[in-house]
Amino acid sequence: YTVPIITASGLGKQYLIPGWRLGWLIFQDSRHGSIQDVKKGAQRLAQVVLGASRLAQVVIPAVLDPCNESDVAAIAQWKENLYTQVEDQAALLCGLLKECQGLEVIHPQGAMYAMVKIHARLFDEDIYDDVSFMKLLLEEE
């Protein structure tokens, strides 16, 4: 490789498992060894941080390397359904937010959140910035 690459992933993100802080880094260094020190530092840090639970560790092989074709197909179908559901929910949320006067929505493109710009000048005098908007929104809830 001519450019070093660090890839980060994990089960918590891929399978939407809150609290499962189980992930990994893949280091693809350049031919010059540009990120050797970064990799060594990450390895030292990983040895200090508390590890994943036994249950999470047992699941890793089954999820990352399923034993049979039916498991592979089931995982692929589950992921496809999950992605479709998340995309549909994002479209619904963004569509509803776009109907709100004074809000400008930036539709997510792969993120699990949407950015919303608040045009405070379009509201009454009680809303003069994003913080005042959020305070009033929380009081309303």
Image: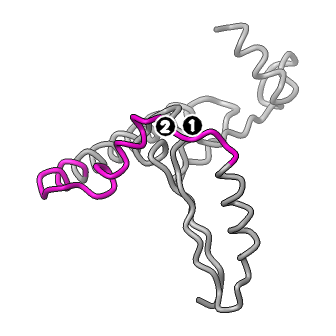
Q: How far from the left and from the top, in percent, is residue 98?
A: 57, 37
Residue 125: assigned label? none
In the rendered view, does 59 fall on the left or right side of 77? right
In depth, the one of 91 and 41 nearer the eye is: 41
Residue 51 in magenta? yes
Q: Which residue is mark 2?
A: 95
Q: How far from the left and from the top, in percent, is residue 58?
A: 36, 42
Q: How far from the left and from the top, in percent, is residue 140?
A: 68, 8
Amino acid, disc 1: Lys
In depth, the one of 72 and 129 nearer the eye is: 72
Question: Quick check: marks 2 and 1 in contact, CB under 8 Å?
Answer: yes
The answer to whether residue 90 is above or below residue 79 is above
In depth, the one of 104 and 139 nearer the eye is: 139
Q: Report helix, strand or loop for mark 2.
A: helix
Q: Which residue is mark 1?
A: 98
Q: Residue at x 31, y 50 (%)?
A: 63
The answer to whether residue 23 is above or below residue 35 is above
- Tell me the magenta residue range: 48-75
- How many angstroms separate mark 2 from mark 1 (CA)? 5 Å
